[in-house]
Image (spheres, coloured by chain):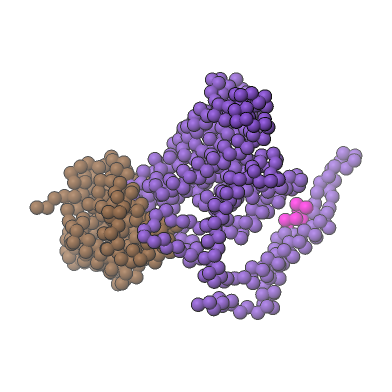
Chain colours: A purple, B brown
Amino acid sequence: MTAPAAVPALGITARLRAALVDASKATVVAFGLFFIMVGLRTDVSPTGALFLRTRWLDVALLCAAVFVSRLALALWLGRRKPEVGPAWQAAALSRAGLLFGPALLALALILPFVPGIGRYELDLGILVLTYVMLGWGLNIVVGLAGLLDLGYVAFYAVGAYAYALLAQYFGLSFWICLPLAGILAAFWGVLLGFPVLRLRGDYLAIVTLAFGEIIRIVLLNWVELTGGPNGISGIPRPTFFGLPFSMSGGPQTFAGFFGLEPSPSHRVIFLYYLILALALLTNWVAIRIRRQPIGRAWEALREDEIACRALGINITNTKLTAFALGAMFAGFAGAFFATRQAFISPESFTFIESAIILAIVVLGGLGSQIGIAVAAIVMIGGFELFRDLDEYRMLVFGAAMVVIMVLRPRGLVGSRAPSVLLGEQRRIDARFVGEGRG
Amino acid sequence: MKTTMLEVDNLATGYGAVQALKGVSLHVDRGEIVTLIGANGAGKSTLLMSICGDPRARSGRIMLDGEDITAKPTHEIMRSGVAQSPEGRRIFPRMSVLENLVLGAQAAGQDPAQQLPRVFDLFPRLRERQSQRGGTLSGGEQQMLAIGRALMSRPRLLLLDEPSLGLAPLISRQIFATIRDLNEREGLTVLLVEQNANQALRLAHRGYVLVTGRITMSGSGAELLARPEIRDAYLGGGH
Ligand SMILES: Nc1ncnc2c1ncn2[C@@H]1O[C@H](COP(=O)(O)OP(=O)(O)O)[C@@H](O)[C@H]1O
Ligand SMILES: [Mg+2]
């Protein structure tokens, strides 16, 4: 059974010819595009008049680049066609996959005490974990229930402002505001859910997008309450169950109470573990609920809404709970964001945030918890890594995302583990469980 | 003593400006297999769906075991003993066979563990394939899954929408045999929609013919099979 899969014996010359034709076609298309977009450029001459500058060399270089890369791609893709690895290889891979999650978790748990991890790295870790949490939260809505939500950042904003305002006007502490922020965000999730109950796919996406913008614009313009574009500053920092992280070192501070040397890193480490705990809570709830009837109903809804109706699944409740639960976790994350930054303004809650979170969910493989964590690390960590590239950063990112989606069209982890099993666990090889219809 | 399980009285409904049913009346007695035949677009699927409350009746009345269910929400109707295997099967393709079945029970508030053995005994093939993804089943297996999923809710009345659609004759005969079995052994009441009029009328105790939203004929299966209009319109040519 280990016979190598028969590769269609296409002669090397025939393949080369096909690749050349393919590359030429791509080059013609590229020329058509670049001829106008790069080749011709209007510039302002020193006298102030407009004149047309031509850049044929650039066009030639770009076309050559397209030709070469297309050729390479065609040859490479043509080479590895029906490649089915031996079974032991797949088994080893899936075993490694099982270990990967716990290893990542262990690393996350000890990260603050790993030598060489300083303030900067921990701050980055906090940022990444915030996005991991947001990704896991949005995954409930998009990955499980299949409701394309482009305005997820609105709930993040609701959570952040809920904490900031409750602390400012009522002097409530972070630990009281955290659940309140989640509840308020969930409430707004339901509020958004009602009008979009009958919408699906692109229509739903447009309305949620608008919803996200409305929330942001309200925050921007309701100056008396939210401070408008100036935002809210002086948001109280979190305490260690009532003990503030203060540098005074008195007995009523964290350092004093535990007899430690006061250090600014205490708060950072605390924030790190706080967001880690919140993210793990999100993960735990999502995993648990997937095995509950409501979680299974979400997935069924994603698969086929008409079938759900025929089965008698309550579509209204199913959708609203997905929106509410997803929003709740964004609300928690928002409250965390506010207490970490001590300052928030509508600028932090623009559409690009929703887009990044959605990209994390899609890149991670809709519905896969571990895939989302990896995607968040890659995306957010990568953003930092390429900070020096300035505006080219986005370009690098766009390219990286395209490459991932070409190589792994279903995201980093595209397989789905069933939520119920009878008797012994029978694993079905992902290779044989191809795309169903629809 | 015959008792009426389902009574549809002068039902009219549609989608927006489309009037799909224009006053349909029919009844299904307890323990009966009743078939509804009609051409494409006659309104058969619409009738089955509106018995489940979606689309809702615009006028007329639907009674289940003497209870008026016309205005009941869909999810409550499906909890009160009605189950449907919808047209085109509509199983959940990325979910396993087992998950599909479990959903059928849970959606109607039944305990899956109690219903599973019965469905697996009825369709042993589903037991073998329980951890396979629904979308990778063959057409016949998908139809078994759709019926099995409907049965998981322990219905009194089973609505089947074109179970033989797109299946090889041998497979569709198996499906029909299972339906007869269910009816004879468990006394399950079945309302069966079919374009395959020949097999359906042989199986059913009674039948109705639906033409553009109206019932034009009714009678026992044998009676309808013998009518020349039926032979011409629904049995001609084909098999
Ligand atoms: N979702 C829908 N929206 C609008 N019109 C529909 C819809 N479903 C069915 N129809 C129309 O209702 C009529 C009956 O359709 P249907 O009940 O599916 O017929 P059948 O099942 O007998 O083939 C047809 O004219 C069809 O075009
Ligand atoms: Mg139909």
Q: Which residue is located at x 45 percent, y 62 percent?
A: A427
User: Residue A13: which quarter of the image?
Assistant: bottom right
Q: Which residue is located at x 37 percent, y 64 percent?
A: B129
Residue B92 shows in this picture: no
Q: Residue furthest right?
A: A47
Q: Is residue A196 magenta?
A: no
User: Residue A261: which quarter of the image?
Assistant: top right
Residue placed most toward the observer, A236 or A394: A236
User: Which stretch did the figure color magenta?
Assistant: A32-38
Residue placed most toward the observer, B238 or A38: A38
Give the quadrant of the C terminus of chain B: bottom left
Q: Which residue is located at x 83 percent, y 53 percent?
A: A54
Task: Measuring from the top left, give residue B134's x and y in whole percent.
Answer: 41, 60
Kindly report the secondary structure that dominates the magenta region of the rendered protein: helix
Residue A342 against residue B151 in the figure, above or below: above
Determine whether, in the image, residue B110 is placed left or right of residue A343: left
Q: Residue furthest left?
A: B1
Determine whether, in the image, residue A349 is placed left or right of residue B62: right
Task: Measuring from the top left, give residue A406's x and y in whole percent.
Answer: 61, 59
Q: Is residue A34 magenta?
A: yes
Residue A329 against residue B47 in the figure, above or below: above
Q: Which residue is located at x 20 percent, y 42 percent?
A: B67
Counting the numbered discs, the total is 0
Residue A119 shows in this picture: yes
Task: Measuring from the top left, give residue A134's x and y in whole percent.
Answer: 56, 41
Residue A239 against residue A305 in the figure, above or below: above
Task: Measuring from the top left, give residue A270's x and y in whole percent.
Answer: 60, 35
